Image (spheres, helix red, strand yellow):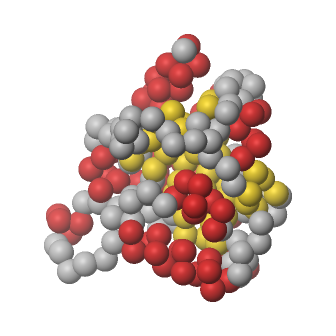
Amino acid sequence: MRTHYPVCLLLCILLVSLTGGCGKKDPATEADRRTESEAASDSGETTPDADGSSSGPVTFEAMTLDGSSFSSDLFSDSRITMVNVWATYCNPCLREMPELGELASSYDSGDFQLIGIISDVMEGAGEKTLQKAKDLVEQTGADYPHLLLNESLYTALLKEVSAVPTTFFVDQDGQILDTVIGAMEKSAWEEKIDAFLEE
């Protein structure tokens, strides 16, 4: 689904303004600039939905960084899908992406897959912006699909995102099983993934 540029720009501005994690600029001292993401990553904070359950299947249509079309039908391809929301300005996001790349290739695709959403790069972005994101993906070895922000993705997953990285675990039916705010070590992600696969 294509979204008109002004709508995407508005959504991106809104998302960045809501993002309490990486990229928040204020006159605080360096010691006070510890982002919500970095604080959450100390314990791998898990944030359940308000009522403890998901509100329905996640549905969206989007384009990848390399121009391929994706939709929420992708969830049916694997028992568990890990959706990692990141931003090009977010150091905790970029630090964990090499290990996420390793995770993406260490499981059978019928059991587990990993998808990235670049929260600050919209569909229709200029070549310079797209190239920056492509370079970061290549530098970090995050060799899995990365979706560009659009209205469909924002409505389906990003409306409640308050910090990056935020990671969702989604089942084959498109139901969100868990939400994690902040970065974690590969071993912690593996424990979480293996627990879902054992259920």
Image mark count: 0
Tell me if residue 91 can be seen.
no
Q: Is residue 50 above or below residue 107?
A: below
Q: Quadrant of residue 30?
A: bottom left
Residue 178 position, x and y percent, is 46, 36
Q: Residue at x 41, y 54 (%)?
A: 92
Q: Quadrant of residue 157?
A: bottom right
Which residue extends farthest bottom? Answer: 6
Q: In this view, does 95 lie above or below 77?
A: below
Instruction: Tell me the quadrant of the picture where the N terminus can be found.
Output: bottom right
Residue 70 position, x and y percent, is 78, 53
In the image, 86 versus 133, the foreground residue is 86
Q: In this view, does 16 lie above or below 100?
A: below
In the image, 42 versus 149, the foreground residue is 149
In the image, 155 versus 93, the foreground residue is 155
Q: Residue at x 77, y 72 (%)?
A: 2
In the image, 141 versus 51, the foreground residue is 51
Residue 71 position, x and y percent, is 76, 51
Tell me if residue 26 can be seen.
yes
